[in-house]
RNA sequence: CGGGACGUGGCGCAGUUUGGUAGCGCGCAUCGUUCGGGACGAUGAGGUCGCCGGUUCAAAUCCGGCCGUCCCGACCA
């Protein structure tokens, strides 16, 4: 491609308001343009990168037995009603009606439609199956952000596995685990596979592939010693026991004027340190009130609570709702003597005695509370959000916590969808069995953005060769006929070799060309000008490290073959 | 949905407080000089000032409503 004919609209200034580095650089480098909130056009350079990512994914999924499909984006609403997700998905699901007033859905994922096709499987002899497609997903995100990292419309590779039993499903899950590791490593991304919450996908087990990045929206807890890693939505940790004071015969009420916070009660004369307090939170789970108890210094991990309750909408109760339920305001709440309300406690409170908590009367607290004796706790659940520095649950190492981008997510779905749609096969004994499913997703745009988040410097992007829009740029430093001729010869040689080359034949000053090449991040630049030409050389500059060398023109082909060996 | 900010040539911004013929930088076009690290000069093209309504002799500027975008939070495979 000749740069003078290519549409690569680079910009000198950052786009207004853009926060994520990848977003700024992808816009400035002429890879993407925003159409509206959470919706982006791919420009030629951007599409070239995305297609590289797409091909890597397709190769690796094909390698584990995948067959490519293409399913529609427009779905009948009835299908989503049958799976139950018409109600479950809430406002994130785009819905519309056709001219006859029939409900439709814009697909946010394709479990339903693939399962519908899987109803044609009739025998265990047809299993296992692994089906996938690359298709646009639409999600009415409440807040799209960070450029391509969180959007309302994006293309995802989603695959679906179909097996006779859990053992077969586990095998396909493992195969995906391996394929995903290879996919991300081929893109240059270092990923950590973490235990994750399955959220609205349902199912039993799920693993996310995470790329450490300050632009990430997830928090990963990872052991520095063993291989334990989990999304904080799921992560557990080991914490030291607290030695409780002498038990009381019964809780003792005392006045705490003006004390409204855990911290204030810690400082209050006659109060208690945070780890000796019980924090009482009131939540509404699909409208039903729930009391949630944690140690005073422990934050609630809301996703853990959502997962435990298996509800759609969870939110903290507001002041009025709290007062109506407990007769006191936040800051003086407690669960002692409360009946008729669902009470869920974090496991760190198990066996604790001589605790202090609110008395459900403003400006009063209780001390000497024995958790097991004085509170009617029905459910003990791990609800605490782990902190960096706490102990690994699996070894004596320590956890670190860092931000990460979720670039892939694999799920064990079980038989939820196959049962809903009647996807059954007959087994060897002639018995009908629901197909055991898995689903596995990678968002193309998010992967591109994640790579950009990792591979950039103050000059712009530095694509790994495997995903670069072009592998080599030939920069003609002067528009002399000899230079142009030499450049075109070199260009032709490389094209024949199968190299993706951009020939910068623009009538621009060298500085502009160098800066643009660095901004869009082409891995190798060959500079050709009168100076090098006189010596029969080209200058080769590696974008990643700035390394510069002179190469004899006749050796270039051989040299490039060596450089790009890995992608040929 | 709560909080905050913004909307002015393709891009980045000033001008709004105090109403009076719309400006700057980059980019773009033509010519000339330059040109191995974002050149310089000259000339020029390009704007419904987000939209609708109101106030006024007069609105980018004041008032009301709406729309859009971004950031923080809530939310979210």
Image: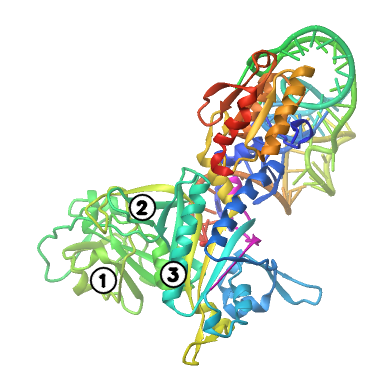
Q: Is residue A339 left or right of residue A522?
A: left
Q: Is residue A561 left or right of residue A493?
A: left
Near-viewer residue (A141 or A497) = A497
Q: What is the span of residues highlighted in magenta in the rendered image?
A: A129-152
| Comparing labels 1 and 2, the label whose residue is closer to the camera | 2
Q: Quadrant of the C terminus of chain A?
A: top right
Q: Which residue is mark 1?
A: A336
Ranked by sequence position, the earlier of labels 2 and 3 is 3
Q: Residues within 10 Å of mark 3 (few under 14, many from 20)?
A: few
| Comparing labels 2 and 3, the label whose residue is closer to the camera | 3
Seen at 38% across and 60% down, the residue is: A301
Tell me the element at label 3: helix
Q: Which residue is mark 3?
A: A171
Disc 1 and disc 2 on one polypeptide chain: yes
Q: How far apart are the alpha carbons under marks 1 and 2? A: 34 Å
> Residue A116, relative to residue A527: is it above or below?
below
Visible residue check, residue A399: yes
Q: Are marks 1 and 3 in contact (CB under 8 Å)?
A: no
């Amino acid at each position: 491609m000749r740069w003078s004919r290519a549409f690569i609209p680079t910009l000198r200034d950052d786009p207004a308001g853009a926060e994520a580095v990848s977003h700024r650089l992808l816009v400035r480098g002429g890879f993407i343009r925003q159409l509206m909130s959470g919706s982006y056009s791919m420009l030629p350079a951007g599409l070239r990168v995305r297609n590289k990512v797409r091909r890597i994914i397709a190769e690796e999924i094909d390698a584990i037995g995948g067959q490519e499909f293409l399913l529609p984006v427009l779905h009948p609403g009835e299908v989503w009603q049958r799976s139950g997700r018409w109600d479950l998905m809430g406002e994130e699901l785009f819905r519309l009606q056709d001219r006859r007033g029939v409900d439709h859905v814009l697909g946010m994922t394709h479990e339903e439609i693939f399962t519908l096709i899987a109803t044609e499987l009739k025998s265990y002899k047809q299993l296992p199956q692994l089906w996938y497609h690359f298709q646009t997903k639409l999600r009415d995100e409440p807040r799209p952000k960070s450029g391509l990292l969180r959007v309302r419309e994006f293309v995802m590779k989603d695959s679906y596995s179909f097996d006779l039993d859990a053992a077969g499903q586990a095998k396909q899950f493992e195969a995906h685990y391996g394929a995903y590791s290879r996919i991300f490593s081929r893109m240059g991304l270092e990923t950590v596979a973490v235990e994750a919450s399955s959220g609205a996908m349902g199912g039993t087990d799920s693993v996310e592939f995470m790329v450490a990045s300050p632009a990430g929206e997830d928090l990963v807890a990872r052991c520095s010693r063993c291989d334990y890693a989990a999304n904080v939505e799921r992560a557990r940790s080991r914490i030291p026991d607290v030695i409780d004071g002498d038990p009381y015969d019964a809780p003792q009420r005392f006045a705490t004027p003006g004390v409204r916070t855990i911290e204030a009660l810690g400082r209050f004369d006659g109060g208690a340190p945070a780890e000796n307090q019980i924090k009482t939170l009131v939540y509404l789970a699909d409208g039903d009130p729930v009391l949630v108890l944690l140690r005073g210094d422990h934050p609630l991990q809301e996703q853990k609570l959502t997962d435990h309750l298996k509800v759609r909408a969870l939110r903290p109760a507001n002041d009025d709702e709290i007062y109506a339920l407990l007769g006191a305001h936040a800051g003086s709440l407690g669960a002692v003597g409360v009946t008729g309300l669902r009470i869920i406690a974090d496991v760190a409170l198990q066996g604790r005695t001589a605790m202090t908590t609110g008395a459900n009367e403003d400006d009063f607290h209780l001390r000497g509370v024995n958790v097991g004796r004085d509170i009617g706790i029905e459910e003990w659940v791990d609800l605490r959000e782990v902190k960096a520095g706490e102990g690994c649950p699996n070894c004596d190492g320590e956890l670190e916590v860092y931000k990460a981008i979720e670039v892939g997510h694999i799920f064990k779905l079980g038989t939820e969808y196959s049962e809903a749609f009647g996807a059954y096969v007959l087994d060897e004994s002639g018995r009908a069995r629901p197909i055991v499913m898995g689903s596995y997703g990678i968002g193309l745009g998010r992967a591109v953005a994640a790579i950009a988040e990792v591979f950039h410097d103050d000059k712009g992007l530095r694509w790994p060769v495997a995903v670069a829009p072009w592998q080599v740029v030939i920069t003609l430093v002067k528009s002399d006929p000899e230079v142009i001729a030499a450049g075109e010869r070199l260009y032709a040689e490389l094209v024949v070799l199968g190299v993706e080359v951009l020939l910068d034949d623009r009538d621009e000053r060298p500085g502009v060309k160098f800066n643009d090449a660095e901004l869009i991040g082409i891995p190798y630049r060959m500079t050709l000008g009168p100076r090098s030409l006189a010596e029969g050389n080209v200058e080769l500059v590696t974008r990643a490290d700035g390394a510069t060398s002179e190469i004899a023109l006749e050796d270039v082909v051989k040299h490039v073959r060596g450089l790009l060996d890995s992608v040929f």
